[in-house]
Structures are given as C-alpha cells and as structure tokens.
Image: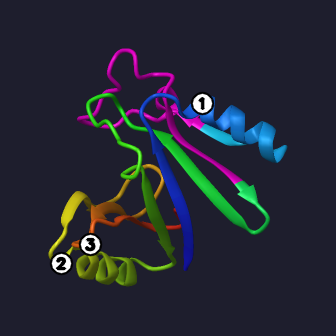
Amino acid sequence: MKVNPYVSFSGNCAEALAFYEKAFNITAEIIRYKDAPPDNGYEVAAGNENLVMHAQFSLGNDALMFCDTPPEYPVAIGDNVAISVGFDDIDTAKKVFAELAEGGEVGMELQETFWSKCFGSLTDKFGINWQITIDCRD
C-alpha cells in the first residue's frame, strides 16, 4: 500500500509546479488534459487542454501528486488536498472504498480508467478527501 498527498489547483498547477521544481531542484512528470487518450463520453472542454491532468515528483522515497481541476469543479484552499492510497488488489481497494464511503459522499465511483484498473474518489464523513486506486495496469 502506498500513501501520497494529492493537491488540486484551480488552473495554476503549472505555475505551482515551476515554483516547486525550483525550490526542490527537481523535474515534475506532467500530463496535460490534451495528452489523455480519447474516452467515450468525455471530451476536454475548450480552454482546458493545457491544464495539468496529473503531475508528480519524488522527494526521497515519497511522491507528491498534483492536478488542475476543470473550472466547473473549482477547489478552495483547504479542500484541495486528498490522500491517495494505492493498493495491489481490487478486492482490498473495494473494501476500503466502501468503508470510507459510509456516511460520506462519493465523487467518482470505483471504475476502470486509462491510468488504473480501479480508481475512485470520495469525501468521508469527517470531510477528508480520499482517492483509492490500483497502482498499475497489467
């Protein structure tokens, strides 16, 4: 199991990443919305193509992850950090997701995505944002 902080921005993620790259003398891996493969039923809205869909960099043995949310899903300081937990198996991910969702609010049901066999997000009953994922695609 891996645990990583995931920070969301409202359109200024690239600016923040440049700042962090300089501060830590690192280079972030960046995927923009325009880089994602086509997905049935989802189109990137005009103007969102260059927003950061996902970025990460390592600090020692840990990774920090970042993204821009589309303008229709603005984030506020304080609500823009999630705890991302990566599992090796789907059954464990499903169990943890169901437990955390009890009394909370599901943002995205667990489902297959182009980056994971299983990914979902939710806010638990205590207001903590979680992302549950399977670490790799086989």
The residue where tag 1 is placed is: 14
In the structure shown, which secondary structural element does the residue marked by tag 3 occupy?
Answer: loop
Q: Amino acid at mark 1?
A: Ala
Cα separation, mark 1 vs mark 3, equals 30 Å
Q: Nearer the viewer, mark 1 or mark 3?
A: 3
In primary-sequence order, the first of circles 2 and 1 is: 1
Tell me, yes or no, whether the two marked residues, 1 and 3, touch with CB atoms within 8 Å: no
Q: Is residue 53 left or right of residue 47?
A: right
Q: Nearer the viewer, residue 65 or 43?
A: 65
The residue where tag 2 is placed is: 102
In primary-sequence order, the first of circles 1 and 3 is: 1
Q: Nearer the viewer, residue 102 or 32?
A: 102
Check residue 138 for magenta coloring.
no
Q: Residue furthest front?
A: 78
Cα separation, mark 2 vs mark 3, equals 11 Å
Q: Nearer the viewer, mark 2 or mark 3?
A: 3
Cα separation, mark 2 vs mark 1, equals 35 Å
Q: Quadrant of the N terminus?
A: bottom right
